[in-house]
Image (cartoon, grey):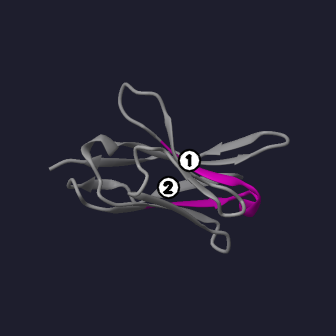
């Protein structure tokens, strides 16, 4: 049974930090690219950060320099370190595992991040 379980969300003041975790099970984690998406109320889901099976990372322009994605294949876990948080970072954050050939996508249930004073 495939599972992606996010944790680490919560309420933080502007300028603060949070670290999201996504624990994976039920599939060969090391063979999947891992992504973090977010969705704010009334907005479409957007890709925030991604990391390939080789460890190459990519970020949305809105989070470059503030967020860092990393993975630990030994622990089947992907992380999103979020620093200098802004109110506009408020959203539900979702972990995604993606593989090509054939295309497969797994999703977590999401974790809420609220940035507010």
Q: CA distance from mark 2 to mark 1?
A: 6 Å
Q: Reading the chain from its start, which is encountered first: label 2 or label 1?
A: 2
Residue 90 part of the magenta-drawn span: no
Residue at 47%, 61% (x, y): give it.
Answer: 68
Q: Which residue is mark 1?
A: 108
Q: Which segment is the magenta one? A: 20-37
Secondary element type, mark 2: strand
Q: Which residue is mark 2?
A: 6
Indicate left or right for 3 with 79 as reference: right
Q: Viewer-proximal residue, 33 or 29?
A: 33
Residues tagged 2 and 1 counted as in contact (Cβ below 8 A) = yes
Indicate left or right for 7 with 97 as reference: left
Residue at 63%, 72% (x, y): give it.
Answer: 75
The image shows residue 55 at horizontal and vertical percentages of 66, 63
Residue at 14%, 50% (x, y): give it.
Answer: 117
Secondary element type, mark 1: loop
The image shows residue 103 at horizontal and vertical percentages of 78, 39
Q: Residue furthest left?
A: 117
Q: Viewer-proximal residue, 5 or 56?
A: 56
Q: Residues within 10 Å of mark 2 (few under 14, many from 20)?
A: many
The image shows residue 48 at horizontal and vertical percentages of 49, 45
Q: Viewer-proximal residue, 55 or 22?
A: 55
Residue at 29%, 58% (x, y): give it.
Answer: 84
């Amino acid at each position: 049974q495939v599972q992606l379980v996010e944790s680490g969300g919560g309420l933080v003041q502007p300028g603060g930090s949070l670290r999201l975790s996504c624990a994976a099970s039920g599939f060969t984690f090391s063979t999947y690219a891992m992504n973090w998406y977010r969705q704010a109320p009334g907005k479409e889901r957007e890709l925030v950060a991604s990391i390939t099976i080789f460890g190459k990372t990519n970020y949305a322009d809105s989070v470059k320099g503030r967020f860092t994605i990393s993975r630990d294949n030994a622990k089947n876990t992907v992380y999103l370190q979020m620093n200098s948080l802004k109110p506009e970072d408020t959203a539900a954050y979702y972990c995604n595992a993606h593989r090509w050939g054939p295309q497969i996508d797994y999703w977590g249930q999401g974790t809420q991040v609220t940035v507010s004073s």
